[in-house]
């Protein structure tokens, strides 16, 4: 396998639009790195530049230590899996798997061996003689993955490969891809707009917005310490509750809002950084699981229950506190009917604070 290194890689289109602005990061040998962000954030453009399908306006791209800015896609030793399966409908599974190797003039015995190995790995042995029309969506996606596997490339590039599958198939294919990565030890770069896919698959995640990298870290560090408001709101389902107010200190730390003063459980580390924000506007972030039902005596606020969403193993409570909409995640339990005011506390030391002007994390 191989390392991939990006040093200030940019893409600027002839009309002046910046598709990717100065992307710099390293991908370790054997790492599964995920590029995630909303539509139009530049993630697919970045992947296509790595593949050689899109030219690089400036910066340097290296694969296994070799500068490949001007190297054609076929000479970069990469394999790409696209959003659409792009299978040849008149060819069997075996023929689809073998096609790229045949074009490269590989010996027939070598081709047969690689096809059998890939089919075994992807549990497609019994479908080698089937045409794509006879396959399920999940099987077609596995054939597309297998066509990349038989190449034995230095780097695998996957561009939203699961977006055409239904929810159940996406879940099973995520497991398949994670299993394949563990077995192969392959270097993989995976593009998705689905933050659940990103969190469950990526060893590290690159979060993009507007062509700019917002943060690079492991899934749990991104979740627990988002660098800015965009990352805080994008990662997590439901998203983080974001609440604008003025920081106040009277009988402890409080967020002053139009609906009243809300007590805050601030850690000693946070208090050090928040001193400079007293009587200034900031944004409080609270994860849904950190907004917890409690008894009235220990409540930070009483919020009106508007909608209950039972998911099975958990329940989402849609709440209203003054003009502020909030979501709490709680275990399954008996709940009153909507319209009732319920007491809630915020988990101490689990709060997030952001600059109201720049969106940057405070501390």
Image (cartoon, rainbow, N blue to C red):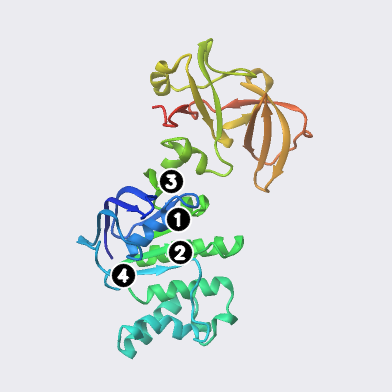
Task: Find the distance from the CA under tag 3 to the CA under tag 1.
Answer: 23 Å
What residue does disc 4 label? 73
Q: Nearer the viewer, mark 4 or mark 1?
A: 4
Q: Viewed as shown, does residue 349 lie left or right of 263? A: left
Residue 210: image tag: 3
Horizontal side of 314 relative to 59 (left or right) equals right
- Where is residue 339, by image quadrant? top right
Sequence-earlier tag: 4 or 1: 4
Name the N-terminal-most of marks 4 and 3: 4
From this viewpoint, is residue 118 visible? Answer: yes
Q: Residue at x 73, y 34 (%)?
A: 306
Q: Nearer the viewer, mark 3 or mark 1?
A: 3
Instruction: Identify the residue at horizontal 51%, vertical 27% (top origin).
Output: 283
Image position of 45 with respect to 293: above or below: below
Disc 3 to disc 2: CB gap under 8 Å: no
CA–CA distance in space, label 4 to label 2: 23 Å
Q: Position of residue 253 (x, y in %)?
A: 51, 16
Q: Residues within 10 Å of mark 3 (few under 14, many from 20)?
A: some
What is the x, y in percent for residue 324? Answer: 63, 28
Residue beneath disc 1? 201
Mark 2 residue crowding within 10 angstroms, few (<14) / some (14–19) / many (20+): some
Residue placed under numbered mark 2 in the picture: 177
Q: Are marks 4 and 3 in contact (CB under 8 Å)?
A: no
Proximity of marks 1 and 2: CB atoms separated by less than 8 Å? yes
Q: Earlier in the sequence, mark 1 or mark 2?
A: 2
The residues tagged by marks 4 and 3 sit, at their Cα atoms, a distance apart of 26 Å
Return the x and y of residue 271 as percentages of the image width and height: 42, 19
């Amino acid at each position: 396998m191989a390392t991939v290194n990006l040093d200030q890689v940019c893409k600027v289109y002839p009309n002046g639009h910046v598709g990717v602005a100065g992307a710099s990061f390293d991908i370790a040998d054997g790492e599964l790195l995920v590029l995630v962000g909303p539509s139009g954030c530049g993630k697919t453009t970045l992947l296509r530049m790595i593949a050689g399908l899109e030219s690089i306006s400036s910066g340097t791209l290296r694969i296994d230590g070799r500068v490949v800015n001007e190297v054609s896609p076929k000479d970069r030793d990469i394999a790409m899996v696209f959003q659409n399966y792009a299978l040849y409908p008149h060819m069997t599974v075996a023929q689809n798997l073998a096609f790229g190797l045949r074009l490269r003039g590989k010996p027939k015995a070598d081709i047969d061996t690689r096809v059998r190995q890939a089919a075994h790995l992807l549990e497609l042995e019994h479908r080698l003689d089937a045409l794509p029309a006879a396959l399920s969506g999940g099987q077609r996606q596995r054939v597309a993955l297998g066509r990349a596997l038989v190449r034995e490339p230095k780097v695998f590039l996957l561009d939203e490969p699961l977006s055409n599958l239904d929810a159940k198939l996406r879940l099973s294919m995520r497991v398949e891809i994670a299993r394949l990565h563990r077995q192969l030890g392959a270097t993989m770069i995976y593009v998705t707009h689905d933050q659940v896919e990103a969190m469950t698959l990526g060893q590290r995640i690159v979060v993009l917005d507007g062509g700019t990298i917002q943060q690079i870290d492991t899934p749990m560090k991104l979740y627990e310490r988002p660098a800015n408001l965009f990352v805080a709101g994008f990662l997590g389902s439901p998203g983080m509750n974001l609440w604008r107010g003025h920081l106040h200190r009277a009988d402890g730390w409080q967020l002053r809002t139009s609906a009243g003063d809300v007590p805050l459980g601030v850690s000693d580390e946070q208090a050090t950084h928040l001193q400079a924000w007293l009587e200034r506007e900031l944004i409080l972030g609270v994860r849904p699981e950190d907004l917890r039902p409690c008894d009235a005596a220990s409540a930070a606020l009483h919020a009106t229950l508007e909608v209950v969403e039972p998911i099975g193993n958990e329940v989402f409570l849609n709440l209203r506190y003054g003009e502020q909409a909030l979501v709490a995640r709680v275990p399954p339990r008996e709940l009153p009917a909507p319209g009732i005011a319920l007491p809630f506390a915020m988990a101490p030391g689990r709060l997030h604070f952001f600059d109201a002007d720049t969106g940057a994390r405070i501390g």
